[in-house]
Amino acid sequence: MMLTDSRQVSNFLATCDIEELRSFLDQVGCPMFAIDVDRDGGFRIATVNEEYERTYGFSHAQASGRRLVDLLQPAEFQRIGDNYRRCIGQGTRITYDETVEFATGVLWARTTLNPLFLDGRAVRLIGSCTDTTAHVQAEQFLAAAHRMARLGWWRRHRQVVGREPRVGRV
């Protein structure tokens, strides 16, 4: 099948079966996922690509067809669901930063969501994730180093006529 414009790609992604969708997403070199939007407004994982599996350790077999509400803690589900609803409500691509907690540690990610519509109804979200953990950790390290370095900074005040110079901590 030859997809020649963005509307055709969007329709294909919104209507194709899960195996076709997964095959398509596997061609992309970053973690990607697809979420089906149920008629009642619920969210169900359609698939994750191979890069998502490698990055997050969450496989297509574990995820496909499962409802988010069944997989996540209530607070986590609320946060993710709010972002999904915001994307659908705005009807356009959104990007946001998030913290994802795993048993093995915390991961920071920048997530981009694209809503797919058929007959005016959101039927699927296509998402991509960029792991920003190293960047966030580097920022935290630099901020801590900056705070620590300020402890050793000293400034000498200018001498006022008739007074001794003052040295003090800033």
Image (tube, rainbow, N blue to C red):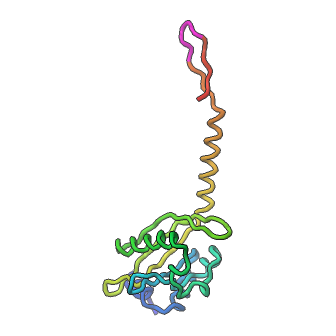
Asked whether the viewer can see residue 26, the reply is yes
Q: Residue furthest top?
A: 162
Q: Residue at 46% across / 81% down in the picture?
A: 43
- 28 and 159: which is toward the camera: 159
- 45 and 28: which is toward the camera: 45
On screen, residue 27 versus residue 91, left or right, reads: right
Q: Residue furthest right?
A: 104
On screen, residue 90 versus residue 158, left or right, reads: left
Q: Residue at 41% across / 83% down in the picture?
A: 10
Residue 49 percent coordinates (x, y)? 58, 81
Q: Residue furthest left?
A: 120
Which quarter of the rendering shows the C terminus?
A: top right
Q: Residue at 40% across / 84% down in the picture?
A: 123
Q: How many marks?
A: 0
Q: Residue at 62% across / 48% down in the picture?
A: 142
Report which quarter residue 47 is drawn in: bottom right
Residue 90 percent coordinates (x, y)? 35, 71
Residue 141 percent coordinates (x, y)? 64, 50
- 38 and 14: which is toward the camera: 38
Residue 25 percent coordinates (x, y)? 54, 82
> Magenta segment range?
158-163
Q: Is residue 128 magenta?
A: no
Report which quarter residue 101 is drawn in: bottom right
- 168 and 161: which is toward the camera: 168
Report which quarter residue 169 is drawn in: top right
Chief SS of the magenta region: loop
Asked whether the viewer can see residue 4, the reply is no
In the displayed structure, 24 sits above or below 130; it is below
